[in-house]
Amino acid sequence: MLARDPSPADRQQARDNSDRAWAEAQQKSPKSRRIAATDSATVDLVDWLSENPDTIDCIQEIGDILAGPVIQELDKRFGGSKPREIRRQLNSHLWCDLLVAVAEAIEKLSKAMDRVPEYVTTVILQSRKAEGRSVLLDALVGLAVRTAWEPIKSMIHTTGIEEVQRGCRILAVLICPAPENHKAVQDGALLPLAKEGLLETSRERLEQVFPEDWVRRLREGLVGAE
């Protein structure tokens, strides 16, 4: 909604709030600084989207896939008598995991599209295990991936690989409940988006709060983009 608003007033307010939160976070914990830095990056992405309406449409289409047929299929197969519990598990970083892994899979397997669902499922399960996140049934993750992949694959043919990748990455950042703690989103979304969607101020803030290896890869990527 902020990105689509023709008036920049609310976006400027969001930026002012972000800058104030960053300044206040300097006297707080490292966690507060990470949150403020990733919020700054989110504000940059919203501003970038306001100037690139085609990407907004792409993100909306991807979001509708997740909120529509994917949720419906998961509710039908896994909702049972505790649909709220299943929804709670799904909101524990599954969607941003899925989006980041899809963007990565598109890049790596663009010539073998039929292998994407299997690859994405494996990446999500490995990522969640490595980050110590809640265990999800392999079948649940696999169903979510397969249901999302077919319409996303159709989008690739009509919208293009790069645009769908970008849309998945931006949406992953926007919907992630805590990107400052989600390594998959940091590496698979924020890092590649830094080249085009983030202002220097936000990149500098992220450099102050993220690990040295992440900062090194960010700088290497920026040099390669020049």
Image (cartoon, helix red, strand yellow):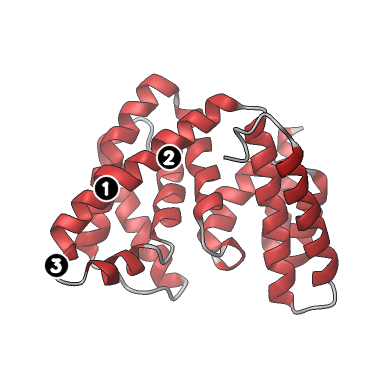
Q: Residue at x 38, y 32 (%)?
A: 110
Mark 3 lies on residue: 80
Q: Residue at horizontal 76%, vertical 48%?
A: 13
Question: Mark 1 or 3 closer to N-term?
Answer: 1
Whether residue 161 is visible here, answered yes or no, is yes
Q: Hey, which residue is sitting farthest top in the picture?
A: 158
Q: Secondary structure at mark 3?
A: loop
Label of residue 108 in the image: 2
Q: Locate the N terminus by quadrant.
A: top right
Instruction: Decide: few, some or many residues near mark 3? Use Cα within 10 Å; few <14, some 14-19, many ≥20.
Output: few
Q: Secondary structure at mark 2?
A: helix
Q: Nearer the viewer, mark 2 or mark 1?
A: 1
Instruction: State the residue position of label 1.
Output: 70
Can you tell which quarter of the image residue 108 is in?
top left
> In x, y percent, where is residue 221?
69, 43
Position of 23 with respect to 45 (left or right) is right
At x 53%, y 32%, the residue is 56
